[in-house]
Amino acid sequence: MTPIVEWAKHYWHELKEPLGFDSEQPSDATTLSRTLARVSLKDFQKALVEFFQCLLAEQKNLTVAVDGKTSKQFHQADAPDFPASEENFQKHEKKEAA
């Protein structure tokens, strides 16, 4: 949970309003763990798939990749920019074309 909390802290200014939160800081790892413990794996998978389907339906030529190593690297100074920017998409497209 720690990488998720760290990511949320870093992007809280962008996440807070769309997610409907009033708090100045995101929930801590313990709160997230307790909350997720109440959600079945099947329901979580379904919600995640639906989220990505909606995201992909609105974008053209968008690739979604979930990578644990990237998540673990988030705290590093040279970690990739999150969330993915248009610049990062263009870099990926150039690599694919080469």
Image: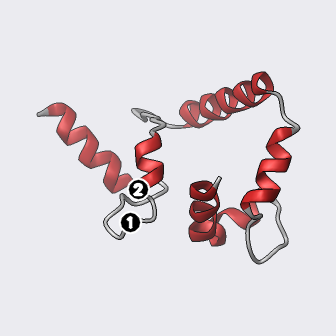
Q: Position of residue 46 (x, y in %)?
A: 73, 24
Q: Amino acid at mark 1?
A: Gln
Q: CA distance from mark 2 to mark 1?
A: 5 Å
Instruction: Tell me where residue 49 sits by quadrant.
Output: top right
Instruction: Answer whether labels 2 and 1 touch (C-beta < 8 Å).
Output: yes
Q: Residue at x 46, y 52 (%)?
A: 72
Q: Residue at x 32, y 55 (%)?
A: 87
Q: Which numbered dot is residue 19?
A: none
Q: Amino acid at mark 2?
A: Gln
User: Which residue corresponds to mark 1?
Assistant: 76
Classed neighbour count for the residue bearing mark 1: other residues with Cα under 10 Å, few (<14), some (14–19), many (≥20): few
Q: Is residue 38 left or right of residue 91?
A: right
Instruction: Tell me where residue 75 sits by quadrant.
Output: bottom left
Residue 84, visible in the rendered structure: no
Q: Callout 2: helix, strand or loop?
A: helix
Say above or below: 43 vs 59: above
Q: Residue at x 69, y 28 (%)?
A: 50
User: Which residue corresponds to mark 2?
Assistant: 73
Q: Residue at x 64, y 72 (%)?
A: 13
